[in-house]
Amino acid sequence: MITVSELRDRRQERDARAGNSGPVGAALHATADLMDARDRHLSGYAWSRYANRVGPRPTPDA
């Protein structure tokens, strides 16, 4: 199982190569890290079962 920090490192490396840095990139990373933290306890299979039961994931501004 890959850790959240490994995913974050890979994402940052990929974005650095693509030039996606700055405030927009930082905001995207913060959002992705929040989602990682919220869903870390659910495997992909468990999350899909849960999502099918409760409907779409709520958006932060809802």
Image (cartoon, grey):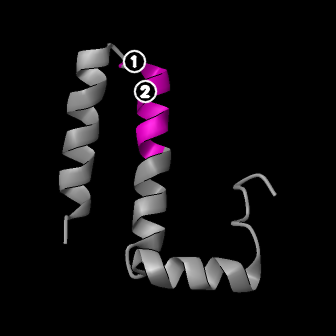
Callout 1 touching callout 2 (CB < 8 Å) = yes
Q: Which residue is mark 1?
A: 22
| Residue 44 occupies quadrant | bottom left
For label 2, the crowd category at 10 Å Cα-Cα, with few meaning under 14, some 14 to 19 and many 20 or more, is some
Question: What's the magenta region?
Answer: 21-30
In the image, taking residue 14 as reference, residue 27 lies left or right, namely right
Which residue in the structure is indicated by mark 2? 25
Q: Relative to 20, is 17 on the left or the right?
A: left
Residue 7: x %, y % from top left: 25, 51
Q: Callout 2, which amino acid?
A: Gly
The image position of residue 1, as x and y in percent, is: 19, 72
Percent coordinates x, y for residue 14 in the rendering: 25, 29
Can you tell which mark lies on residue 38?
none
Please tell me how crowded label 1 is: few (under 14), some (14-19), or many (20+) other residues with Cα within 10 Å. few
Name the residue at the top extreme. 19
* Type of amino acid at the residue the image marks with label 1: Gly
Residue 15 colored magenta? no
* Cα distance in 3D space between marks 1 and 2: 5 Å
- Residue under the point 39% across and 79% down: 43
Q: Main secondary structure of the magenta part?
A: helix
Q: In this picture, is 60 found above or below 13? A: below
